[in-house]
Amino acid sequence: MFACFVLLLALWFAPAQEREIVRQSEEHFARGVELQHKGDMEGARAAYEAALKLIPRRIDALSNLGVIFAKLGQYDQAIIRYRQALAIDPKEYSIRLNLGIAYYQIDKYQRALGEFDQVAKAQPDNIQARFLLGMCLFETGKLKESCAELEKVYGAQPDNTAAAYALATAYLLDDQVEKGRALIDKVFKELGSAEAHLIFG
């Protein structure tokens, strides 16, 4: 929203040549959004890159381009775009969350942990960030810290089966056997035997 407002101001006050550049960039960006919604990732990528060629510091285009590369499985390229966007505005926490997810997807858990930690500190109620932070702590062997984060997630969302499974697993590996078994038993009762065995098996 803020980025669009800045573009409108630029369009209003800039000289005619600059207004045309902004207009063309906005046209490419809008086309990228349209193609992205239609599932044409390669077309959207080309449109966002065209928008950025005209205005290289467009956070919205950098962020969306990062999403496109992530969907294409090109996580290294996604990381580059997310980092470029965050260099412009480090407080774009939705982009920082996506950066953490991209690191997580390529098993760079320590780097992902740092991004999720920043989001969780800035947005304490961001359950997704807390869950992913807990998972990164788990992957890096910090089991007690992982349990603490996952407890917050499970406390906020007691119906979240993924959080329950992750927390129970963390408990068991951290030798908190009674807590792990109690949570597993609770999930077994809530889900029904067959579904619970499938999840925990």
Image: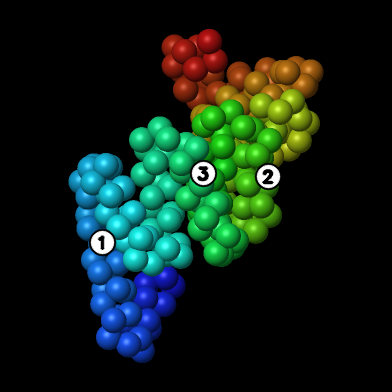
Q: Nearer the viewer, mark 2 or mark 3?
A: 3
Task: Report if residue 78 is visible in the image.
Answer: yes
Nearer to the camera, 129 or 198: 129
Name the colour scheme: rainbow
Q: Amino acid at mark 1?
A: His
**Sequence-wise, which precedes: disc 2 or disc 3?**
3
Residue 113 lies, in percent from the top left, at 66, 40
Q: CA distance from mark 1 to mark 3?
A: 22 Å
Quadrant in the rendering for residue 99: top right
Q: Nearer the viewer, mark 2 or mark 1?
A: 1
Residue 91 lies, in percent from the top left, at 59, 62
Quadrant in the rendering for residue 12: bottom left
Mark 3 = which residue? 79
Residue 170 lies, in percent from the top left, at 69, 24
Quadrant in the rendering for residue 185: top right
Is residue 58 positioned above or below 75 on the image?
Answer: below
Nearer to the camera, 180 or 114: 114
Disc 3, SS: helix
Please report the residue visible at 52 percent of the width from the left and 35 percent of the height from the top: 160
